[in-house]
Image (tube, rainbow, N blue to C red):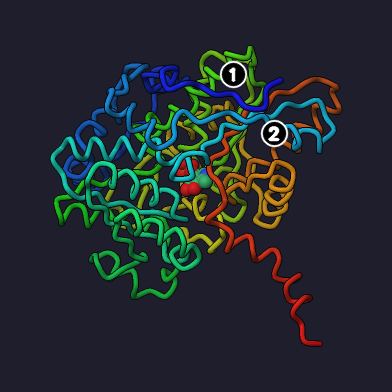
Amino acid sequence: MKTRIDLTQDEMPDFWYNIIPDLPEELPPPKDETGRSIEVMKKIIPAKVLEHEFIKERKVKIPEDLRELYYQVGRPTPIIRAKRFEKYFDAPIEIYMKMEGYTFSGSHKINSAIVQAYYSKMDGASLITTETGAGQWGIAVALASALNDLEAKIFMVGASYYQKAYRVTMMRMLGSDVNPSPSSLTNIGKELMKNEKNKNGSLGIAISEAVEYALEHNGRYNVGSVVNADILYKTIAGLEARKQLETIGIEPDYIIGVVGGGSNYSGLAFPFYKDYKDAEFIAAGSSEVPKMTKGEYRYDYPDTGKILPMLKMYTIGYDFIPPPIYSGGLRYHGVAPTLSLLMKKGIVKARDYDQDTIFKFAELYSRLEGYIPAPETSHALPIIKEIAEKAKMEKKKKRILMSFSGHGLLDLGSYSKMYQKDDENVFSPS
Ligand SMILES: Cc1ncc(COP(=O)(O)O)c(C=O)c1O
């Protein structure tokens, strides 16, 4: 059995998949509580992206220029069979990793960033604004704006800005302007800075700042998760994975991955949802931000400043200030409406794991497979253990497809905390 499954550039799918017509019931629409949020969206979201947000067709053609850009940033990505990790569990499992960490930006985020930058340019805009948590989305936007000759203004959650200094440098190397949020560049930022509880920032705050800045500077705001259009673009990963597994005659029994706002998991899983009726869908998040397991399914604001329309989703509240965990990409308070609906219907199951648990899994995976996962990505690894135990008990083969959403090479500062105790022992003067 092959360890690596590739697609050629010509084999890369030439459409994105839109799940909306296949959902078990109609998606609750966004709600314009303030009476001005839809107007705001029309001003700052690229016209084509806004059109895609509400599109009804199942397939959306990928323009030829965008296919070229996808190749340039590392698509199609391989699937790698994690054979040594499989062996560790001593159970009848096969693990197929869809390696989004192999893209130049280092995560799945580029799949949508490159598209939104392209459509921003098509609007005649010269500036993109966005928020970023741990910086994966920020790097993707920085790369996408560089390749489309656009300026980028990036608001990075304060806690992450200081934890992930190399990510900040990478964005700057790519030509973007990066600011810790809350910042004094926006009115909402200045207001929120007055309250000590906001000092670490949150994605909700950073979104409000990016939206305000786009509005005031005639920019286009690019969204890194949650919304339908962003997920549509990210289905390129799932569509590729389907083709790759079909080539070798494999049907996954489980499709797993992690959820920040939900686009990573949805991007891989949605293209399997309609045709793979026997597959089980399991998504993991952080128990420090337990929106999937302890949140409520209701209308809530996607941003702290309540500028954007409300969405029906699993949420722990738009004003929730998450602890400064290292998996910054999982700190968001809500889950994409499409994915939330599938969770509500019991089609996608949720798990939450804490930071200490996932660090151990990240270390184990690195040692066995020789590739360091992002802390966010590692939240899906304990699901493999759960499936392995079940497979062993049932003595039945289980094939697992996982979104390997990003590499952890810029997360070494966080991982180094695991070794601090050892270092203290080595360097202790006594
Ligand atoms: C490596 C990695 N994986 C997963 C996620 C979660 O992504 P999403 O918000 O698309 O669910 C993030 C978010 O930043 C990330 O950086």
Residue 90: quarter of image? top right
Q: Which residue is mark 1?
A: 245
Mark 2 nearby-residue class (10 Å; few <14, some 14–19, many ≥20): some
Q: Quadrant of the C terminus?
A: bottom right
430 left or right, relative to 318: right
| CA distance for labels 1 and 2 | 14 Å
Residue at the spot x=27%, y=40% of the render? 117
SS state under label 2: loop
Tell which of 58 and 166 is nearer to you: 166
In the picture, measured across the screen, residue 258 lies left or right of residue 208, that is: right
- Depth check: give the residue in front, 114 or 38: 114
368 relative to 396, above or below: below
Residue 54: x and y in percent read: 29, 27
User: What percent of the width, then of the height, locates residue 72?
Assistant: 37, 35
Q: Which residue is mark 2?
A: 82
Decide if residue 41 is on the left or right side of residue 59: left
Give the amino acid at mark 1: Leu
Name the spot of residue 412 as percent of width and height, x first: 59, 59
Q: Can the viewer see residue 378?
A: yes
Number of the label disc, if any, that sits on residue 6:
none
Q: Position of residue 378 (x, y in %)?
A: 63, 46
